[in-house]
Amino acid sequence: MLDGAAAAAAERQAREAAIRRRRQRGAQAAVARAVAVGARYAVEAAERSVSEALARRTEAEAVSAGGAENLKAIRARVRELAGHLDTVVNTAHGTEIARAEHRLRLAQLAEHALQEFGIEPETLVAEYGPEVPVPVIGDEPGVTVRYDRAAAERRAADAQRQLDRLGKINPLALEEYEALSERHAFLATQLEDLRKTRRDLLTVVKEVDDRVQEVFASAYADTAREFEQLFARLFPGGQGSLVLTEPDDMLATGIEIEARPPGKKVKRLSLLSGGERSLTAIAYLFAIFKARPSPFYVLDEVEAALDDVNLQRLLGVFEELRESSQLIVVTHQRRTMEAAGALYGITMRGDGVSAVISQQIASRQPA
């Protein structure tokens, strides 16, 4: 029975505890519901606050952006105004300096006019001021017009350009001009001397040319005459002559030999035989000898290509030349040796040494 009472008491306690827990859970649930309702209200209020904060933030950002743009524009305007202010200040400063310089220049000009010319500034302005007509440079004499600063500046600019084209002033120009004048006079004198010398040389050259032409013409005429005679003697019945290639220019002319042996119609030397060409050359050579004689002549085997008949004719010409000149003839022809006045030969002795031998021919004069 004791155990049952304890169990009942325990059961009552358990029920009471369960009732307390139910009550406590109900109270907690009521509190939780109240908290949930308050939390819902708080969340709604927080959301409204966040929305309002976002709107205010957007508005503030827009206001801030507009303010930054305005600030930027204001700063740009401030910089522009500052630059303009600096320009105005510098201009004003420069203007003030220029005015000061002008005042100083005017004071200097007034002082200079007073010291140099004894004219007061008022009198100077009255007589030479901008209202007084001034003569126009370059126009007709006596023409005066009112002073025009722009026109005066243009004339001054033109004058300055002309002065610039002239270049810098050379302080040594007079000395250089005098030196160049002396040099020019010296060179002119030398040039005149050279011209005079050239004229004299041309005169001498002309005289020499005239003399050469005269001597050549005389020698040619004598040689041509002698050639015709000798050719007729060496070629009996033939005809030979000398012809000038340029008769009008005796200084540049050449000489051609025309030879026509008897019985032939040809005149060109290339068509003659070897003996005829040799005899024609001898006739031309001896014609020169007879036209302009020399004390002696040296001939080297000139008759080697001649036959006996032509050799005999040549020896006759030798006899004529021996009357006024001495002939030294190198020959192997016996008949030529017989016509000589003295013979000279080279022989070799038994010991192999060359020796000169000579033989005088008493019946003839030395050739």
Image (spheres, rainbow, N blue to C red):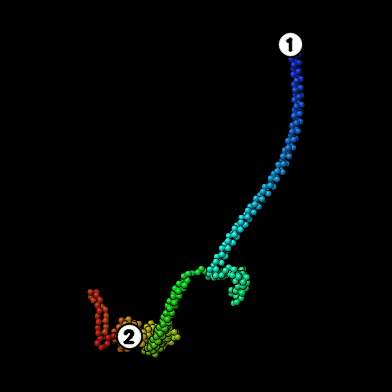
Check disc 1 and report the residue beneath it: 3
Q: Nearer the viewer, mark 1 or mark 2?
A: 1
Quick one: SS at disc 1? helix
Is 245 above or below relative to 67? below
Quick one: SS at disc 2? loop
Out of 94 and 35, give the one closest to the viewer.
94
Q: Amino acid at mark 1?
A: Asp
Q: Quadrant of the C terminus?
A: bottom left
Q: Is residue 187 left or right of residue 61?
A: left
Q: Position of residue 54 (x, y in %)?
A: 72, 40
Check disc 2 and report the residue beneath it: 294
User: Which mark sits nearer the N-terminus, 1 or 2?
Assistant: 1
What is the quadrant of residue 160 in the picture? bottom right
- Count of number-bearing discs: 2
Q: Amino acid at mark 2?
A: Ser
Q: Is residue 45 visible?
A: yes
